[in-house]
Image (cartoon, rainbow, N blue to C red):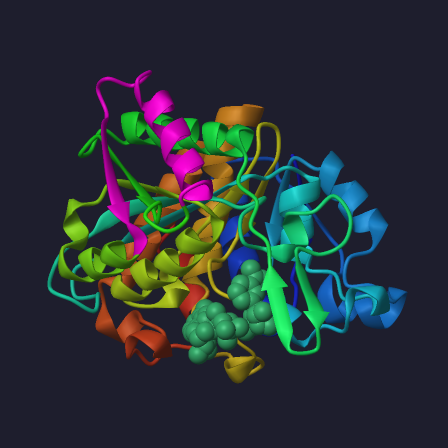
């Protein structure tokens, strides 16, 4: 199986290196047969090729079995016509990786509140409020005059239907509370969030064993802090889910803990939930857990969709090694109040894999 590795910007190189140590170890332990190839994206690609996302990289991503995608510093990129392509958005839209699956789980001794939490946010990530993914041509954000800025949001029946189905399938597979919480603001966004709710309710009828609840997004932010343990699968459109998932992962202890994948019907990219963290880049203090857990999710996806033998088992060994390391306060990284740097933490995880 070919895995395309794209380290990205900021802390990308450090957390990718840490993740590769773990992947090399499970590759050997479980005889997975993973073959890694590397390419530049982001500022490294911009310097060499004039664009943050060269066409060859996207073409290669279409051919590989899986992608390990580092974070990118797109806030600092030049304009699109100067080569500043939002790599993350381009992968999601061009490879149709429409489901951004974002788990958040508390562990003993970790977490910002007292309540336990084990939820997954199912985020639609190819449309919504994001101006770079809601127009056929041009941008969904524009200025009719220098003093007026406007933005369009796109919500389609097709995208709502397939992400809702993913959410209900996941709730069924997880065998936990068997509940999907649909987050919306249909009180204001009557047509767009109204369509999202209408489609979600229709899909829900195919899953009589799964409860559908509906919560308005502002109340959801409060409920997530007050009572995170009541949520199982949380289904939301792009922007709401982006914000709520950072809240959920920080509640679990740190933004650095939360793995995620972007999955379509035939392709998958592992990608940390957080950004490129330029404020801590190059100091060996970033927590690599998010990308390591994302890689574990990719192995699970490869097992299910590409028949990767022992992929599930290898993923489970990564989850267990991470849990075991995080259980020790002296084995945690700086964001969690621990003493370890990025490399040292990865080594502890590798040491616990066997
Ligand atoms: P961020 O997620 O990079 O960082 C937010 C805060 O969390 C920072 O204080 C950072 O140090 C901390 N943090 C993040 N990841 C961490 C980790 N693994 N370990 C320890 N601490 C961690 O968000 P930001 O600062 O708002 O954005 C920085 C850049 O990242 C911007 O250019 C933004 O556009 C980009 N971004 C990229 C992605 C992506 O590639 N998918 C996602 C979000 C933001």
Instruction: Assign the N terminus to one quadrant of the image.
Output: top right
Left/right placement of residue 172 relative to residue 132 reads: left
* Residue in the picture at 53% in, 40% down: 155
Where is residue 253 shown, x and y percent of the image?
27, 67
Q: Can residue 306 be seen at all in this image of the molecule?
A: yes
Q: Nearer the viewer, residue 324 or 49?
A: 49
Q: Is residue 238 above or below residue 196?
A: below
As for residue 170 lying within the magenta part, the answer is no
Left/right placement of residue 27 relative to residue 183 reads: right
Where is residue 123 shown, x and y percent of the image?
44, 45
Which residues lie in the magenta part?
190-217
Where is residue 181 shown, x and y percent of the image?
27, 40
Q: Is residue 80 above or below residue 93?
A: below
The quadrant holding residue 81 is bottom right
Where is residue 247 shown, x and y percent of the image?
32, 63
* Residue in the picture at 36% in, 22% down: 202
The quadrant holding residue 136 is top right
Left/right placement of residue 268 relative to residue 52 reads: left
Q: Can residue 351 be seen at all in this image of the molecule?
A: no
Q: Nearer the viewer, residue 342 or 47?
A: 47
As for residue 213 lying within the magenta part, the answer is yes
């Amino acid at each position: 199986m070919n895995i395309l590795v794209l380290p990205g910007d900021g802390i990308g190189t450090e957390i990718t290196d840490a993740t590769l140590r773990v992947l090399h170890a499970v590759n050997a332990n479980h005889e997975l047969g993973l073959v890694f190839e590397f390419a530049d994206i982001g500022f490294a690609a911009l310097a060499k090729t004039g664009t943050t996302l060269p066409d060859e990289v996207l073409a290669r991503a279409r051919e590989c079995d899986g992608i390990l995608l580092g974070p990118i510093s797109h806030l600092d990129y030049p304009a699109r016509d100067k080569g500043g392509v939002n790599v993350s958005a381009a992968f999601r839209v061009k490879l149709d990786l429409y489901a951004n699956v974002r788990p958040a789980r508390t562990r003993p001794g970790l977490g910002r509140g007292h309540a336990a939490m084990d939820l997954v946010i199912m985020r639609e990530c190819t449309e919504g409020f994001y101006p770079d993914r809601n127009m056929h041509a041009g941008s969904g954000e524009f200025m009719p005059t220098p003093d007026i800025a406007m933005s369009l949001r796109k919500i389609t029946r097709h995208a709502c239907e397939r992400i809702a189905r993913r959410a209900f399938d996941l709730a069924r597979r997880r065998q936990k509370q068997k509940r999907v919480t649909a987050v919306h603001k249909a009180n204001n966004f009557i047509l767009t969030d109204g369509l999202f709710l209408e489609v979600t309710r229709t899909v829900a009828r195919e899953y009589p064993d799964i409860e559908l609840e509906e919560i308005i997004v502002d109340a959801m932010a409060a409920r997530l802090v007050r009572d995170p343990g009541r949520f199982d699968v949380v289904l939301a459109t792009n922007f709401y889910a982006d914000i709520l998932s950072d809240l959920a992962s920080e509640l679990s202890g740190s933004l650095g803990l939360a793995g995620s994948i972007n999955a379509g019907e035939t392709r998958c990219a592992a990608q940390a939930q957080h950004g490129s963290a330029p404020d801590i880049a190059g100091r060996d203090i970033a927590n690599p857990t998010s990308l390591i857990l994302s890689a574990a999710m990719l192995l699970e996806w490869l097992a299910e969709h590409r028949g990767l033998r022992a992929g599930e088992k290898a993923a489970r060994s990564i989850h267990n090694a991470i849990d075991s390391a995080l259980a020790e306060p002296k084995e945690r990284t700086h964001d969690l109040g621990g003493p370890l740097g990025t490399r040292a933490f990865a080594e502890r995880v590798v040491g616990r894999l066997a």
